[in-house]
Image (cartoon, rainbow, N blue to C red):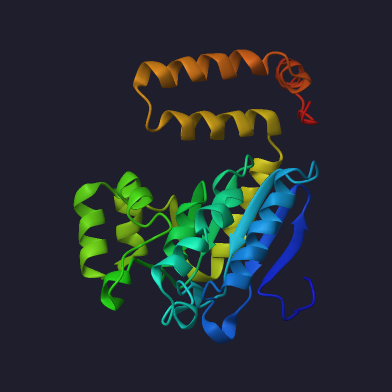
Amino acid sequence: MLEQTDSPVLLERPAIGVALLRLNRPQATNALSLELQALLSRYFSELAVDPEVRCVLLTGGEKVFAAGGDINSMAGVGPIDIFQRHTERVWAPIQHCPKPVIAAVCGYAYGGGCELAMLADIIIAGRGARFCQPEIRIGIMPGIGGTQRLVRAVGKAKAMRMALTGQPISAEEAWISGLVSEVVDDDQVLTHALELACSIAAMPPLAAEQIKEVILAGMDAPLETGLALERKANALLFASRDQKEGMQAFIEKRPAKFEGR
């Protein structure tokens, strides 16, 4: 365990191939300050090109994942100030991270916290977790994916209800709706998410990255386009050493050792 610091985001290396990013503003319920967002963006940019990292795990605290945007930094500003923050650029390294990203969510993921969790490829939620887009209650609306990613995850009816009422949904409802991947006991969230991250990190990284890329690229494409992307990505992997190693290990009934080549 790394020593606690005043940094709003802590980077840890809990296992081979796994990087853990921990939101660290407990005094502000992990509200997404501009400093926190910038640091998170920088870390994702660095981890994306780090050959030692095969999976990124993102978490908050035991009681709260992230409470949303920092209202104090928004209350007195105008539309041009908000526009010029270019949150799409700040969040781009998270959105476009080529490596699998797992969010481990305990407590509430509200507003920007919910939007941040939705950038992950897999969400592991504690039974006590809550997801919410409450922006309408303060006179605004989700601005970093809370309408577009939410509707793609849970469908129009549930997205409309969440965004128009600002009411939270439980982890169980989020799982039924397709927002989260798995629900576990609150005290097992990080342990389970880390086990999953280690399992993914042990897989061939080139295949993992291609799977992620094709699923995301094909989600909003016509089926035939997605299938074409899938065929070409699959064929490309037959040029890798890991494909040769994986199939030979299967034939020889031994564990494969994947190198990302």
Quadrant of the frame with the C terminus: top right
Pinpoint residue 97: horizontal percent, then vertical percent. 61, 44
- Residue drawn at point x = 58 percent, y = 57 percent: 90
Left or right of 182: which side holds 60?
right
Quadrant of the frame with the N terminus: bottom right
Report whether residue 193 is seen. yes
Left or right of 237: which side holds 74?
left
Q: Residue furthest bottom?
A: 27
Q: How many marks?
A: 0
Q: Foreground: 229 or 261?
A: 229
- Residue drawn at point x = 54 percent, y = 63 percent: 189
State the image quarter where residue 250 is shown: top right
Pinpoint residue 27: horizontal percent, then vertical percent. 57, 87
Q: Is residue 61 above or below residue 39?
A: below
Q: Residue furthest front?
A: 80
Report whether residue 126 is seen. no
- Residue drawn at point x = 29 percent, y = 59 percent: 173
Q: Is residue 27 above or below residue 169?
A: below
- Residue drawn at point x = 58 percent, y = 71 percent: 34
Pinpoint residue 116: horizontal percent, then vertical percent. 49, 59
Pinpoint residue 65: horizontal percent, then vertical percent. 51, 70
State the image quarter where residue 110 is shown: bottom left
Left or right of 71: which side holds 207?
right
